[in-house]
Amino acid sequence: MGVPGWFARERADGDRFADLVDGTASPEDDEFAHELALVGGLRELGAGGAPDAETRQRIRDEIAGRLAEAEATPKRRGHTVANLAAAAVALVLALGGITLLLSKDALPGDPLYGIKRAGESAALGLTFDEQDKAKKHLEFAANRVGELAELTRQDAPTDAYFTGLTDFETDLRAGVSRLTAIVTDQGGQTRLTELRSWARQQSDRLGVQVGQAPAEARDKFAATRSLLDKVQARTTDLGSRLVCYTITTGSSDELGAVPAAGDCVRDPDSPDAAVPPVSSPPPSSAPTGSPSPTSVPPPSSVVGTAAPTGPIAPPTGGTPPPVVPTPGPTNLPPLPTPTATPKPPLISIPPLIPGLPPIIIG
């Protein structure tokens, strides 16, 4: 298909004008004279308005500053996001602390009771000593009993009692398991005695609350008290095996290590082995069969004189000679009484389980 003639002519004229503007061709007569004059005027106008070197440097610096500011904008935005995130975390922690403080007196069934239990779990996670963990578990279990007593005064629903008793059993099992593991490994008849006393005390507290609890929850109270009876039996059985070579069977149940059965072969190296009694001090009186002290024979009334050999001449005067009294037996000083052995000082052991009196030995 051929190109129209007018299009070819316009294209040729445009190429001719471009060559004249670039200076690659020379105009013929007045060819494009008006257009070329207009282009020359524009060039002179542009050259006259060009900035000097100082202006160009100022413009260049301003452009460079704007570019640097544009590059730094995302970083400031990132800092802003980080600050907002830190503020949000601080707000959450503050609200969490306030909520945890408000949940301190929450009872089973309350909306904040779950937060209270979460705080107790966090406290256990920050406790690294096994004995301290066992004590915390038992402390939390005792708190559940106090909360159940408050529920009976508020006529709470049955579900609240089930929640409190279930949490009590959970902490009870965890505390007893940890404590019996420590006792079987390190000994400690005192710990078992205190644990048995603590379990008896909590059972008595629950027994008082049963009559005021809903009828639907009384079976759960009975099951919990039965678990406390098992704890008391477990402490008794373990206590009787602490002086044996074989203390446990090597297996465990919900309350921890299971005591061994059968004959007890005593381990003299056990920390709970009986200490032989101290020998009694010697009696204050002299032992039987020892010679009794005798009196020293009286000295002679005349010392250093010989006995008369002839008959004694009667006194020449009417006054009889003075009679010199014979000294009686000399009494010896009493024997010293043996000093009594001083009594050992009293030793007070702080209670291992909160709520129990200290143990005094001596």
Image (spheres, rainbow, N blue to C red):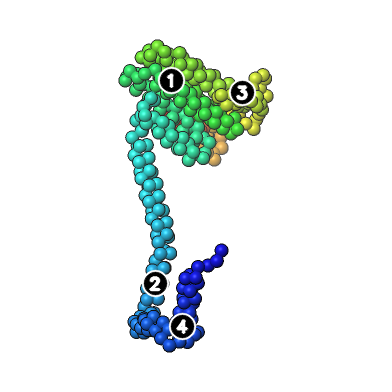
Q: Say whether disc 1 or disc 3 marks the residue closer to the N-terminus.
A: 1
The dot on residue 162 is: 1
Query: Label 3 is placed on what type of residue?
Result: Pro
Q: Which numbered mark, 2 or 4, is in the foreground of this view?
A: 4
Crowd band around label 2 with a 10 angstrom C-alpha radius: few (<14), some (14–19), many (20+): few
Q: Say whether disc 4 or disc 1 marks the residue closer to the N-terminus.
A: 4
The dot on residue 20 is: 4
Quickly name the residue at label 3: 259
Q: Nearer the viewer, residue 88 or 252?
A: 88
The dot on residue 63 is: 2
Q: Which numbered mark, 3 or 4, is in the foreground of this view?
A: 4
Q: Nearer the viewer, residue 117 or 304?
A: 117
Where residue 163 sits in the image (x, y, percent)? 43, 23
Q: Height in image: 289 above or below 185?
A: above
Q: Are marks 3 and 2 in contact (CB under 8 Å)?
A: no
Q: Nearer the viewer, residue 267 or 253?
A: 253
Query: Label 4 is placed on what type of residue?
Result: Leu
Residue at 37%, 37% in the rendered image: 100
Query: Label 2 is placed on what type of residue?
Result: Ile
Q: Which numbered mark, 4 or 1, is in the foreground of this view?
A: 4
Distance (Cα) linking label 1 and label 3 = 31 Å
Distance (Cα) linking label 4 and label 1 = 103 Å
